[in-house]
Amino acid sequence: MTEKQMRPIVVQWLKKEGYGVAHEILISGYCDLAGYRFAERKDKRIPELMEVITVELKINDIAGAIRQAINNLYFVNESYVAMPLNRCVKMRPKSLAQFTDSGIGLLGIDTKVTEIISPNSDFRKDISWMKKKMWRWERNGYQRLEQKKQKLYPIKGKFCGETKNGKPCGMPAVYRSGGNYDHYYCRDCMPEKVKAKYE
């Protein structure tokens, strides 16, 4: 199961739980999914933002997923990581303890969502700074998902730095990931969240 395949299942779960859903939204960094709840709107003003939770979609990288979820937790009421259910049930107790100790929830995904570990909840946090951001999603955010995807073209002189079966991929690169060091990907090796943004 890929991140792309998990996304609609988690979105459906969030909606069933009564949340509006924002995709790839900037919180501590770009978060895969955020669920939000507003108070009832009584006039033309933006209603009070009652709750925000985040969900990071990951296939394998437990340490990286927890790190991202912890960063989100500084700003939101609850923070989850979602991983394939068959990956969750094989986790060692030490790995599961990292979620519990960090206050991060764990969701197992197959055809539905199973809450493996419940997150710590903190509803004392000031989330009012996100009110306008979430309201834009509430009003017209899904228009962003319908925008035409950009095309990617080979980057002159650059090749994919990923490895396959212990050997360098070596295919022409079409995407550069910035950071302390540039990393190049071919179309097949790009992360799922990047593939979702480009043709």
Image: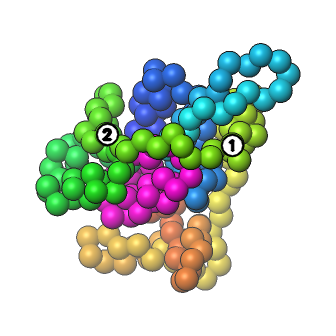
Q: Residue under label 1, please give it.
A: 128
Magenta residues span: 55-80
Which residue lies at the image location 77% right of the left edge and 16% below the top edge?
A: 42
Place of residue 111 in the rendered image (x, y in percent of width and height, measured from the top left): 31, 28
User: Distance between the Cα atoms at labels 2 and 1?
Assistant: 24 Å
* Kind of element beneath mark 1: helix
Q: 76 or 58: nearer the eye?
A: 76
Q: Is residue 92 left or right of residue 44?
A: left
Q: Amino acid at mark 2?
A: Ser
Question: N-terminal of the two: label 2 or label 1?
Answer: 2
Place of residue 123 in the rendered image (x, y in percent of width and height, measured from the top left): 51, 40
Which residue ends up furthest to the front in the rendered image? 124
Residue 198 makes an appearance in the image: no
Place of residue 198 in the rendered image (x, y in percent of width and height, measured from the top left): 62, 52
Q: Is residue 16 left or right of residue 51?
A: left
Residue 60 sits in which quadrant?
A: bottom left
Q: Is residue 109 above or below residue 151?
A: above
Disc 2 versus disc 1: nearer the observer: 1
Q: Is residue 181 above or below residue 56?
A: below
* Kind of element beneath mark 2: loop
Which residue lies at the image location 65% right of the left edge and 60% below the top edge?
A: 152
Which residue lies at the image location 27% right of the left edge and 42% below the top edge?
A: 117
Q: Residue under label 2, please give it.
A: 118
Residue 145 makes an appearance in the image: yes
